[in-house]
Amino acid sequence: MIGFKLMAATALAAGVAGCGAEPQSTPTAAQTSNSNQVAMVQVRFLDDKGLPGPVVSSPKVVKTDAEWAKQLTKEQYQIARNKGTEAAFCGAFYDQHKPGIYYCVCCGLPLFTSEAKFDSGTGWPSFFQPVAKENVLSHADHSYGMNRVEVLCARCDAHLGHVFDDGPRPTGLRFCMNSASLTFKENQNLKDATSH
């Protein structure tokens, strides 16, 4: 547990020090495929009340670096496509208290709701669970001498942030996300869990 707290503190210090991370050079399987087949993923979309629907097949979103750079701002591209990290306490959503849904900035897949958001005190938007386990992927991340678990969008492999095991009930998880990897749409059918 001490090692985990030290790791979390190191990650916080790195985020406060500034933005940016080493680009990941390993392409995804979907990007390296030479076939014309479109890779499919299993995800869940939300209804107008913010409730996840059934698991459905959706095409994997694959674009060139140039296409992503044209679609995203410089900061969004650096974080979502090059695995960067925004500085703590400066992202658009870390202190967001409106009810609504957080989507992937790259492909629009619903990822988190305000009902799962909580104030972690870290300076990044934090959630105790995604809208559906199918909508996010996790991978071991050993960059910067730390052992962390990276969180990616399941449909386009956008870097979202990291997940830690020091979150609140009911999951005990803290999905520590970058605001630049997310977009937000207000939805009055949802409640804001951070106000409770």
Image (cartoon, rainbow, N blue to C red):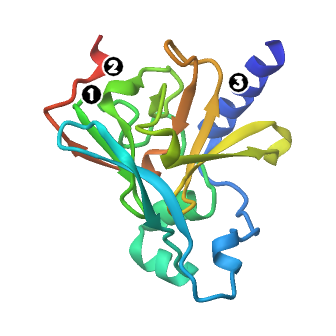
- Which residue lies under the disc numbered 1? 97
In the image: residue 33, left or right of residue 130: right
- Mark 1 and mark 3 lie on one chain; the one further toward the N terminus is 3
- The answer to which of 11 and 52 lies nearer the viewer is 52
Relative to 183, 25 lies left or right? right
- Residue 20, percent across and down? 63, 54
Q: Earlier in the sequence, mark 3 or mark 2?
A: 3
Q: What is the quadrant of residue 49 in the picture? A: top left
Q: Type of residue at label 1?
A: His
Name the residue rendered at 73%, 59% in the picture. Answer: 22
State how many labels appear. Answer: 3
Tell me the kind of residue under disc 2.
Thr
Please state which amino acid type lies under the numbered disc 3: Ala
The residue that label 2 is drawn on is 194
Q: Is residue 141 above or below residue 127?
A: below
At mark 2, the secondary structure is helix
> Spatial distance from mark 3 to mark 2, Cα to Cα?
22 Å
| Residue 1 against residue 164 in the figure, above or below | above
Tag of residue 25:
none
Which disc is residue 9 wearing? 3
Decide: is 37 above or below 122. Answer: below
The nearer-to-camera label among 3 and 2 is 2
What residue do we see at 30% from left, 10% from top?
A: 196
Q: Secondary structure at mark 3?
A: helix
Mark 2 closeness class: few <14, some 14–19, many ≥20 residues within 10 Å: some
- Labelled pair 2, 1 in contact (Cβ < 8 Å): yes
Q: What is the distance, in whole Å, between disc 1 and disc 3 at their CAs? A: 25 Å
